Image (cartoon, rainbow, N blue to C red):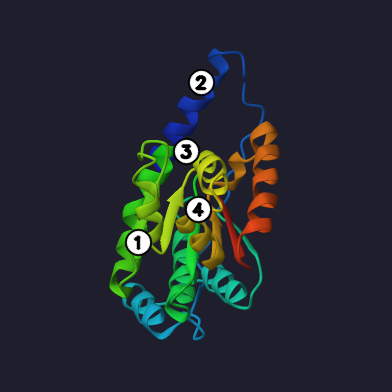
Amino acid sequence: MASGETQGTSALLQHLLGEIGLPVMEVERLQARPGRFAPVPAELAEPVRREVQRRFPQGIYLHQAQAISEALRGMNVCLATSTASGKSLAFMAVAGHLLASNPTARVLALYPARALVQDQIDRWQSFLRPFGVSTALIDGGVDTQARPNLLANNRVVLMTPDVAHAWLLGRAAAPENSRFLDGLRLLVLDEAHVYDGVFGTNMSFFLRRLTAVAGRYGTIVATAT
């Protein structure tokens, strides 16, 4: 956005806030900073590293490289950076690495709303398709009769927390659910800032239940807030 557009938007916003009795008392403008880049981590599985390098020949953001490296060391990672800063690439690259390194590995990605799951499924499929990894979504709109086949035939599954709690864990002893949970090696929690209040409390109990019945997995939490 050009400087004139930015100033015009700021003035309009201040005017609108003043109209509803919320006057702006102070304005601080933060100067843009150049991005910091790093090479794609060499420890990534070779096909994944090649794909990331193909997409980003000049390297990736430093925070992406650090998040990937820490996750591959077995650390749980919280990635809190601004919108459109490449958080998805970081956890998808880690997912690709784990799936390429272990044929029985499974990945569960949770999004707090159906709209978010449906918005993200194409990005997951686009990234993982070159490695022969299939991805599916299971939300409240997916028939319960179809869910076991989706779980059995896809190594990456995107879910909403309610479905993961009521259906995945509620039927943890069912063969397809049990195999998926046993193979779980990565849990992705995107839009993590939403998990507060009662929703956050319920989520904490869900995560404790998941830890009790699933295999040994790492966690990547991502938030723009």
Residue 157 image offset from top left, x and y in percent: 43, 56
Q: Nearer the viewer, mark 4 or mark 1?
A: 4
Q: Determine the CA span between mark 1 and mark 2.
A: 55 Å
Residue at the disc numbered 2: 15
Residue at the disc numbered 3: 113
Q: Nearer the viewer, mark 3 or mark 1?
A: 1
Residue 115 image offset from top left, x and y in percent: 40, 38
Residue at the disc numbered 1: 153
Is tag 4's residue or tag 2's residue first in the polypeptide sequence?
2
Q: Determine the CA span between mark 3 and mark 4.
A: 25 Å
Residue 188 image offset from top left, x and y in percent: 54, 57
Q: Nearer the viewer, mark 3 or mark 4?
A: 4
**Number of marks present in the image shown:** 4
Badge 1 vs badge 2, beta-carbon distance below 8 Å: no
Badge 2 vs badge 3, beta-carbon distance below 8 Å: no
Q: Is residue 36 left or right of residue 130?
A: right
| Tag shown at residue 199 | none
Give the crowd class for mark 2: few <14, some 14-19, many >=20 residues within 10 Å.
some
Q: Is residue 2 visible?
A: no
Q: Residue at x 58, y 69 (%)?
A: 67
Helix, strand or loop under label 2: helix
Q: Quadrant of residue 88?
A: bottom left
Badge 3 vs badge 1, beta-carbon distance below 8 Å: no
Q: Is residue 133 left or right of residue 45?
A: left
| Camera-nearest residue between 104 and 75 | 104
Q: Determine the CA span between mark 3 and mark 1.
A: 23 Å
Helix, strand or loop under label 1: helix
Q: Nearer the viewer, mark 2 or mark 3?
A: 3
Badge 3 vs badge 4, beta-carbon distance below 8 Å: no
Is tag 1's residue or tag 2's residue first in the polypeptide sequence?
2
Q: Residue at x 65, y 65 (%)?
A: 76
Is tag 2's residue or tag 3's residue first in the polypeptide sequence?
2
